[in-house]
Image: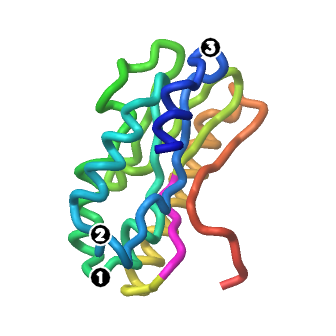
Amino acid sequence: NGLEERLRSLPSSDGEWLVHLGDFNNFFETECASYAYEEFNSLLSNSPVPVYCTPGDNEWNDCPSPDQAWTNWMTYLGKYDTQYWDKPSLYTVQRQKGQGENFAFVHHRVAYIGVNMVGGFLHDQDEWNTRHESNLRWIRNRVEKYYENVEIVVIFGHAEPNSS
């Protein structure tokens, strides 16, 4: 596997973490069965540095059973950075209450914020709106909290921006 080899050969001196933005899964082939998440979990564990994950639509809402897919994602990839690596000593990772897949930390005067922002099929407009409003509150709250200590804010999410 090419990704496995690249992960193993990453020099940990060149970076302190990775962020995976989703879409590892081909839901037509796997039907979002738990083995696909488990295999990807195992693959990412080869990284010499912690890996932070945000969900993609191919692992969640584009799946035949989105609720089961979300359970699989949270089981195998939620808070993934805590599964194989020690707690970072140079920064503190914070998680959003009620949306533990969202994360934030400050390192070298840069705020890194990960949010659950997927594209794909829209199954529940109310849930979608609530999650996105919650994401915006999380981002605003983190920026306000970090304002005096950062020069740059980097926001990670899966879906590309659009006008809708």
- 122 or 31, which is in the foreground? 31
Earlier in the chain: of badge 1 and badge 2, it is 2
Residue placed at 37% from the left, 73% from the top? 27
Q: Are marks 1 and 2 in contact (CB under 8 Å)?
A: yes
Earlier in the chain: of badge 3 and badge 1, it is 3
Report, in whole angstroms, how far the alpha carbon at label 1 lies from the one at label 2. 7 Å
Q: Secondary structure at mark 1?
A: loop
Q: Return the residue found at the far right.
A: 151
- 130 or 120, which is in the foreground? 120
Q: Which residue is mark 1?
A: 64
Type of residue at label 2? Cys
Q: Which residues are magenta?
A: 115-120
- 27 or 138, which is in the foreground? 27
Q: Which residue is mark 3?
A: 13
Type of residue at label 1? Pro
- Where is 73 relative to 109, above or below? below
Q: Quadrant of the C terminus?
A: bottom right
Q: Position of residue 1 (x, y in %)?
A: 46, 44
